[in-house]
Image (cartoon, rainbow, N blue to C red):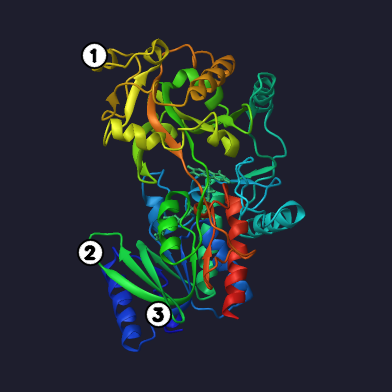
Amino acid sequence: MALAHANAHANEWNPSDSEQRGIWRNMTENVVSQERTHVDALIVGAGTAGLLAAHELLRRRPHTSLLLVEAGPSLAARLEQPPGGMSGLGGAGLYLGGRLYLGPATLPVLPPVSAPSTLRPILAGDAYQDRARAVDAHFIRLGARSAVRHAPDPRLAEAAARAAALGIEYILSYPTRPLTPEERRSVLARLHAELEQQGAHFAFGWRVVSAARGAAGFTVNLAAEDASGDARRIRTRALVLAPGRYGAEWLVRMAEALGAEVAQLPATFGVRLELPAAAYAPLTDLNPDPRLQMPLTDDAVIKTYATCPGGYVLPITRAGALVASGMPVTLEARRPSTTVAILAQPGVRGAEARWRGGEDLARRLNERVPGRLVVQRREDLRAGQATTAEALAAHSVRPTCAEAVPGALHDIYPAPYWAAFEALLTRIERLAPGVATGDALLYGPAEERFWHFPTSDQLETRIAGLFVAGDAAGQSQGTIQAGVAGTLAGEGVARHLG
Ligand SMILES: Cc1cc2nc3c(=O)[nH]c(=O)nc-3n(C[C@H](O)[C@H](O)[C@H](O)COP(=O)(O)OP(=O)(O)OC[C@H]3O[C@@H](n4cnc5c(N)ncnc54)[C@H](O)[C@@H]3O)c2cc1C
């Protein structure tokens, strides 16, 4: 309890503030010297899942000593930063997107057919909807005012109908409550204040780097995100890991190190396309991330993923491989090109048969061209020839990823990939002329991996007191869903603490 009541003004830890650093250091050292460096519960990540876990825990167990550790900034500091960061109070979607999808869903998200047998729905139907409505109602109490939209606006509905006529599913989630930026700020500011009033402490700008199991829970190691080199250690009886999509690989490492079960789902793989923003504008002007999906034979699909209008291609390391990712930018910062991934999801049967080779495509392409992405012009791909540096230099679409190496992608992917790629692009061409016929660059490899963490219905792993929640755990792909996951984890922690 020492932590929760140490200092009424120290609820928001900001290591760049030397006074607060001092308070944190003194408090922690005092607690260390008393051998009471512990809290009842520690939550990693103050995104939707972490915040709702905290809310639910304190609602059910009001005097719990609770620390939320968030690598990013507080709301006030976040508002002063350039827009676009995914980290800080509110995490990614609640701060940046703010569309609350209120339609039916399952928790965890079930990938089509390819789910391993251990992946079972924890919540579906009315049970899910009741929780989703409760999260929405909480946001309304905190300042969400916008009315629910039950259907897309006519232009978007028309685009979806035209896609359907071409054999493409345009994935739209309705009903939706779209929060304005002011509403998002209000929800986050009040949620933060409410949690503090209930005794929760926030450590902003601190990253949880590792944890170990002990006799009565976990020892958690924190490192300051600034240049101070500060590090802290804290013990907790219950640990909730909710680090979001970008923390998924860290979560896998943590969960495995702590002895929890982790299953990797079949990879989705493909290329990241870069094309003139004007060509894709008929779709991105209606919806910045149009999700188009086409069924293939067996249980396979090919789909667009993570469109970034006016954005750029960024190499990132995922599951040990260097892959092409897309970086979204604000409206004002948009560049002349749009980038979108075209990913194949082979499904369980497909991965073993026609699509064999997709699973380790990224590794093989990385071996061929170590440490760099490969970029190929679409016309060279069609001609079955590698792109040369001269051809790339003269190309009309300027590569946004300058360090990518011109070369060949066509000969390394499983053959069904290119057939599916052409089929999808030819159809999208009918919705956005110029997408398939115009100049485009392809970057490879592109890959998305998801993991599944078997848990109890309250998201407790097989390690007592260790909970996983939100997008990183593969449970959610949206704010409301992540909130539902958080409430389940909060309920589970309350039960665990007794
Ligand atoms: C640009 C963008 C817009 C989106 N818009 C919408 C939308 O409008 N509607 C919707 O439903 N969904 C949207 N989403 C999806 C939505 O963001 C996620 O489904 C949701 O945020 C998941 O919540 P979470 O709590 O699991 O993770 P996050 O919201 O990502 O929060 C995780 C937090 O954990 C912190 N963290 C990670 N690792 C550590 C660590 N080791 N130590 C300390 N802190 C750590 C991160 O800094 C982050 O703040 C959007 C996503 C993006 C990227």
Measured along the vertical axis of the image, is residue 65 above or below residue 127?
below
Q: Position of residue 467 (x, y in %)?
A: 53, 66
Outermost residue, bottom side: 34
The type of residue carrying mark 3 is Asn
Q: Earlier in the sequence, mark 3 or mark 1?
A: 3
Q: Secondary structure at mark 3?
A: loop
Could you give the CA–CA distance between mark 3 and mark 1, rounded to whole angstroms?
64 Å
Q: Nearest to the eye among marks 3 and 1: give it.
A: 1
Q: Is residue 400 visible?
A: no
Report the disc number at residue 7.
3
Q: Are marks 1 and 2 in contact (CB under 8 Å)?
A: no
Alpha-carbon span between mark 3 and mark 2: 22 Å
Residue appearing at x 65%, y 28% in the figure = 169
At mark 2, the secondary structure is loop
- As rendered, which of 385 and 198 lies closer to the eye? 385
**Dot 1 lies on which element?**
helix
Q: Is residue 106 left or right of residue 311?
A: right
Residues at marks 3 and 2 touching, judged by CB atoms closer than 8 Å: no
Q: Identify which residue is drawn at 56% across, 18% down.
A: 423
Task: Mark 3 vs mark 2: give the one in front.
Answer: 2
Residue highlighted by disc 1: 390
* Figure quadrant of the C terminus: bottom right
Image-based side of 406 in relation to 453, left or right: left
On screen, residue 127 versus residue 12, left or right, reads right
Q: For mark 2, does the 10 Å Cα neighbourhood hold few (<14), some (14 to 19), or many (20 or more) residues? A: few
Q: Which mark is residue 137?
A: none
Whether the residue under disc 2 has CB within 8 Å of ligand 1: no
In the image, 128 versus 349, the foreground residue is 349
Res. 393 image quadrant: top left
- Of residue 184 and residue 134, the one placed in the foreground of this image is 134
